[in-house]
Amino acid sequence: DVVMTQSPLSLPVTLGQPASISCRSSQSLVHSDGNTYLSWFQQRPGQSPRRLIYKVSNRDSGVPDRFSGSGSGTDFTLKISGVEAEDVGVYYCLQGTYWGFTFGPGTKVDIK
Amino acid sequence: QVQLVESGGGLVKPGGSLRLSCAVSGFTFSGYYMSWIRQAPGRGLEWIAYISNSGSTIKYADSVKGRFAISRDNAKLYLQMNSLRDEDTAVYYCVRENWRSVDYWGQGTLVTVSS
């Protein structure tokens, strides 16, 4: 299986400041169809996860534009341009290029 | 609007069986791949099974292969879970697949395996 790692695993942030989460895969996530199937999810306390980004950099409908995704190959990043209180939660990356699809371990974001 | 509603979770003894159901609405069920993802208490996410829109393609994670079976009909998704183990204790989410990812999640149903 493809192993996904994230760093940091814990991220205390100051309201209004930017935040960045790294996600790395054990092999390239470029699919034979040319797409890179890396997505990002937010899970607020007590809620189901919610997708923010798919195919590296495509933001889902209704997701604030302070969230952005970038990267290629094996290295990917989720950025929050200015953290708001509602952004507290755990963030997961997911690779969908190879079955079994695998999630990263999660990065817990909270407010300093 | 898209809705996914799981049911069937509960307490079961090791070695027992349980069948989860997921009722969907708000979209054309036959047009989408569907999956089950689980989350052990306080832990991360594990994608355990998916089924194509026609039901002709099914895949399982190694952790559940041979014990769990995913199926679908009409507007319902199912997960038959046999030979349950302590480590199967988790919240089980019914999800809709989109772009080899998930665009909609149910609220989850808790399965507890304990003697």
Image: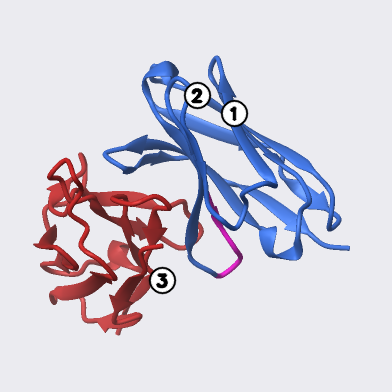
Chain colours: A red, B blue
Residue holding disc 1 = B71
Residue holding disc 2 = B55
Please state the extent of the stretch shown in magenta in the rendering: B37-42
Q: Mark 1, chain letter?
A: B
- Can residue B20 be seen here? The reply is yes
The secondary structure type at the circle numbered 1 is strand
Q: Pointers 1 and 2 in contact (CB under 8 A)?
A: yes
Label 2 or label 3, whichever lies nearer to me, is 2
Confirm whether circles 3 and 1 share one chain. no
Q: Quadrant of the C terminus of chain A?
A: bottom left
Q: Which of the two residues, B38 or A59, is positioned nearer the viewer here?
A: B38
Q: Mark 3, chain letter?
A: A
Identify residue type, mark 1.
Answer: Ser
Q: Is residue B97 above or below residue A47?
A: above
The picture places residue A53, in percent across and down from the top left corner, at 21, 51
Which residue corresponds to the image point at 75% horizontal and 60% vertical from the top-left?
A: B85
Residue holding disc 3 = A105
Instruction: Locate residue A80: give its quadrant.
Output: bottom left
Q: Which of the two residues, A36 or B66, is positioned nearer the viewer here?
A: B66
Identify residue type, mark 3.
Answer: Pro
| Image side of residue A16 versus residue B28, left or right | left
Magenta-span inclusion, residue A94: no
Mark 1, other Cα within 10 Å: few <14 / some 14–19 / many ≥20? some
